[in-house]
Amino acid sequence: MAEVVLKSLSKSFGRDVGVEDISMTIPDGAFVVLLGPTGAGKTTTLRLISGLEKADAGEVWIGGRNVADEMPAQRDVAMVFQQYSLYPHLTVRDNLAFPLKSPILKTPPEEITRKVEEVARVLQISHKLDNKATALSGGEMQRVSIGRALVRDPAIYLMDEPLSSLDAKLRTDLRVELKRIHASLGATLLYVTHDQIEAMTMATHVGVLDHGRLVQYGTPREIYENPNSLYVASRLGLPRINVLPADIFGGVPPGTTQIGLRPEHITQGDGQEAEVQRVEHLGDQNRLHLTLKGHAITTIADPATDYAPGTMLKISPKNPLCFDAQGHRIR
Amino acid sequence: MSSFSVTEPTQRTKWVSGTLVIIYALVTMLPLAWIMLTGFKSPADAISYPPKVIFDPTLEGYVNLFTTRTRQTDEFLAANPPETWYEEIVREYDMVIAGPSKFGERFLNSVIIGFGSTFLSIVLGTLAAYAFSRFKIPLADDLLFFILSTRMMPPIAVAIPIFLMYRQLGLSDTHLGMILLYTAVNISLAVWLLKGFIDEIPREYEEAALIDGYTRFQAFYKVVLPQAATGIASTAIFCLIFAWNEYAFAVLLTSGTAQTAPPFIPTIIGVGGLDWPAVAAGATIFLLPVMIFTILLRKHLLRGITFGAVRK
């Protein structure tokens, strides 16, 4: 395990920007999650660290070495691809053993057997070890591809949406498992996801990317509670943060043109009159869809509440986030 | 209940397509069957009219193919009774076996040159196709077009320059010369076919292997090659068939040491009359290697078995 440092990393593909001037430090043992929409540069960042892409400018330091001239094999990184990329001509066992058999690791056979079986047990694919990689379901393939990274003990694990194609139960199991691996091995991980729960539950640090730039980097709580732009604020939170004109409730600092209001930051029973449009019963909570002066607002309510559509409800903001016209935070 | 299904052919379609396939198979296989049968006929049966379908099989054709024979005096024949079954066959015509014919040697030349040039075409073709498929090569499209353009004229059109060049270089009538020549003709086909196959193998496999601790060449060898096996096998069959059957250059450039079987077989006709059974026997044996090679590789010709482990 090692610290990974990115220094002013830039990469473009023709006229498309991949990443631009990214600087970040992934501390030894950290679990860093990268958030951002498609095309924000998350995968490009992973590929630059792994050496599959060469940076136009900037440096990657892994464990104190500048790896600019190193092949991917020499960089000592493990990567889980979004496309599973299992070797189709090999069995699951051989797929898992493939990195261990590489000329760089040259693991002794009994060690390979032990590690492969251990990883297969953790990922619940022991019974499929002798299947061809192509004879698996999507979820099984995804687990094998995670396993192919976990058999190693690299400087950093790079994972590109590794849980995206799994069903809900397995996703939860593996999330816990990854967290456990992180905690017990002290592994360093850089993890790309769209999933808020994955980001909030596993990450020690979250980096938010926008058009190839790192716009905020901090702990998950910091990113959630103290975003420095409207863009960052809308990356996390489910239901999404409500974006409303500044004058709708009043009482905001000068320069504010819009406010961001998280669904749980709305007090009911006091303030402006809003009309209930729709109620979703989620079991542990009710999700209320309201309109206030023509603006849609989503909030949450106690599951015991029983509002019918058309009911008028008084609401007021609690700790709104204020943003200027460009979406920058006003504190 | 309706048994209609979009993917299952109907009974009638099955019958019609089955019949068509059988007719086509008969049309293409009849001449082959005729050649094979003729190889086991006596010279008289071979030219009888109407043609004989039922006949006394004999190995005379094969014996004549592999041996040279001389006529001997009655005293000599009486003093030396035949010792083996093939001597007995020859004795019916008052002849004795003088020695082996050149067929074995020529056949071996065909094997060396055919498989040698196929091997070389595939090795060079696979490496070139991989480079064209994966690396940024300046003027790649123009280079590929140039490679293809070497096939736009019949190879025999450059026979005379090649003949002169080979004489200068001392490559005439050598195995190396013929291997190089057939490789030069086959390489364009190999590069183009194999590039198509390699293009279809997703890059992610190699990228995964690079990260798993392998060099580019090891990734190529361990991950790309096994998956390109299908393409390599079918390309190899095409290359072998060309090199194996090639006649014009073989006549022109070889006469002795490196002569292949195709120019040799017709020369049997000139030796001691029209010995059709021997010619047919030669053609039959000549067919076997390509047939066996194709049968061995046929499972690779069924495509699609290795695809599908990358999510698209």
Image: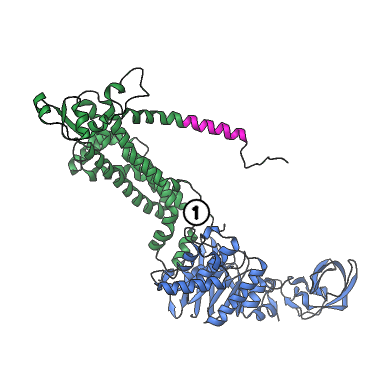
Chain colours: A blue, B green
Q: Give the camera-side residue of A163 and A9.
A: A163
- Judged left or right of residue A281, residue B209 is left
Q: The C terminus of chain B appears in which quarter of the rendering?
A: bottom right
Amino acid beneath label 1: Thr
Q: Which residue is mark 1?
A: B306
User: Could you say where residue A79 lies in the image, as x and y percent from the top left?
Assistant: 51, 69
Q: The N terminus of chain B appears in which quarter of the rendering?
A: top right
Numbered marks: total: 1
Q: Give the camera-side residue of A289 and B52.
A: B52
**Residue with the most extreme right position:** A311
Tell me which corner region of the image, top left, top right, bottom left or bottom right, holds residue A297: bottom right
Report the magenta stretch's main SS.
helix
Q: Give the camera-side residue of A139 and B121.
A: A139
- Judged left or right of residue A139, residue B180 is left
User: Could you say where residue A219 lies in the image, as x and y percent from the top left?
Assistant: 63, 81
- Residue depicted at x 53% and y 81%: A185
Q: Give the camera-side residue of B47 and B139.
A: B47
Question: Is B21 one of the magenta-colored residues?
Answer: yes
User: Could you say where residue A192 lies in the image, as x and y percent from the top left?
Assistant: 58, 70
**Residue with the most extreme top position:** B49
